[in-house]
Image: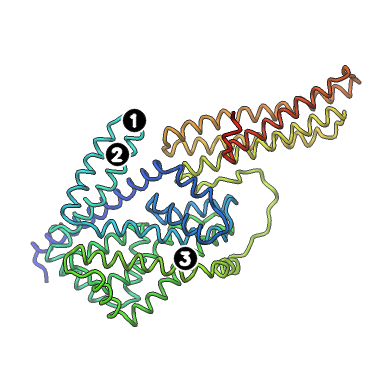
Amino acid sequence: MFTAEEVMQLVQSLIWLLAGVGVFIVGMNFMSDALEKSAGNGMKNLLGKISNNRFSGVGIGAGVTAIIQSSSATSVMVIGLVNAGVMTLMQATPIIMGANIGTTITGVLVALKNDYFNMVMYLLAFAGVMMSFFKNEKIKIAGSLCCGLGLIFVGLNIMSSKQAFKNALVEELFINVFKAIDFPLLLILVGAVFTALIQSSSAATGVVITMVGTGVLPLDMALFIVLGANIGTCVTALLASVGANANSKRVALIHFTFNVIGTILFALILWIFKEPIVNALVSIIPGSDALALQMRVSVFHVVFNVTTTALLLPFVKGLVKFSQLVIKDKAEKSEEITLKYVDKRLLNTPTVAIGQLTKEVFRMSDIAMQSLNEAIAGFIARDLSVAEKIAEYSDKVSRLDKEISDYLVQVSANGISLGDEKVVNALHSTLGDVSRIADLADNFTKYTRREVRDNLVFSEGINEKILEMHELLQNQYKIVKQIILEKKYELMT
């Protein structure tokens, strides 16, 4: 039994431990947000290269996750893109697989922790705070990145300090707890539940690596917990799919299935060949210092995710078919005018959302231009039957205008860079121009009514001039679309 003094000491140590985890997670969020803002265009370019090639999909998933340091965020983004109809299940599945590889970078960083490295990171955290006082936005973002990276190691150091894991009482407590649950399935469950609670496999793996480095957690047990963390990270994607369409739910199911299959395979191998695997890790990374202990967990984490991806990549079609069997398509609803290329889940990645909104604005523009085309054709042919169709087009444009404007406001409220803010302002302005095109189509139907009602006959050549101007407008619109959507900037000359 513990004395009153020991109980108080134990409580204080656990508080230190929780504080360390909290600082670590805050640092992760700071760094993730800063990386997302600073590398937003990089993410957009990567996602713009989406194809049906599985290997490029894995590369895109790993690249995006390495940029934003969160496989959960990548999964939520992919669900949003699938829900918006921008990405197919066949394209999304390899990206989800690649995300698991990209997230291992955090574990490698954490494993590199030592006294000298920590000193540099602490200075980096201080420099980041100082940089936040600058007015220049790029310096502020760089400051958030430095501060986040520094705080990660401040949190890790708090966890591995004498007040936390290195405290004799805490060490004894955890050793006894892990002895009590020294069973693979229980350890996997611990990893899954802990990761689900903190919503970050990177943070969970970081804590496990730190525990191994301090000697609180044996390596063989840590490996099973790391496996469980890969299942726990699926909770974020599963929650994000609630209320989404069938395909988005399938993405979340594929993510979960992929990680469960990988965990089962590795758990069985590790269960049967635990001693040879542990010995292999020790021989690959010799030494008894904290750095060596930590790197063994990190290496296993990388091997697990890379191997699982390599094994299951040939079965992408099978995973997609399985998800379609489990989650059936719902009956089609009546057509509804709503946003097609964006989704509320993309609000967490403003740069990507803004890129998709540009497509949405052009979708609205296409409707407005189609309305104008038919209105002018009706005017030339003195055909009043197009009036009802023009009214429908006008209603669609009006509703899309409202929805896009509302989404732009939500994106702006989410904290965006100066560059993105300029794009948002430009899109707001463009919405007004597009609405005026739809208004012009309405005016042409009014002119047609008057033309037919009053039997007006225009001078010879007027219709030809109108058609000529209309053709110039159509050509100009095609060029603008090519410049913005296809990035053919040479057409601007």
> Can you say which quadrant of the picture contains the C terminus?
top right
* Disc 1 secondary structure class: loop
> Can you say which quadrant of the picture contains the N terminus?
bottom left
Of pointers 1 and 2, the one earlier in the residue sequence: 1
* Disc 3 secondary structure class: helix
Q: Identify the image quadrant of residue 233.
A: bottom left
| Position in image of residue 159 (x %, y %) | 20, 57
Residue that protrudes farthest toward the bottom in the picture: 272
**Which amino acid is tagged 1?**
Asn
Measured along the vertical axis of the image, is residue 239 above or below residue 186? above
Instruction: Indicate which disc residue 278 carries.
Output: none
Q: Residues within 10 Å of mark 3 (few under 14, many from 20)?
A: many
Residue highlighted by disc 1: 136
Residue that protrudes farthest toward the right in the picture: 455
Residue highlighted by disc 2: 143
| Position in image of residue 363 (x %, y %) | 64, 40
Measured along the vertical axis of the image, is residue 47 above or below residue 381? below
Along the viewing direction, whichever of 441 and 479 lies nearer the viewer: 479
Q: Residues within 10 Å of mark 2 (few under 14, many from 20)?
A: many
Please say if the residues under marks 3 and 2 sit with CB atoms less than 8 Å apart.
no
Residue highlighted by disc 3: 256
**Which amino acid is tagged 3?**
Phe
**Which amino acid is tagged 2?**
Gly
| Position in image of residue 306 (x %, y %) | 41, 66
Q: CA distance from mark 3 to mark 2?
A: 35 Å
Looking at the rendered image, the disc whose residue lies closer to the viewer, 1 or 3, is 1
Please say if the residues under marks 1 and 3 sit with CB atoms less than 8 Å apart.
no
Figure label count = 3
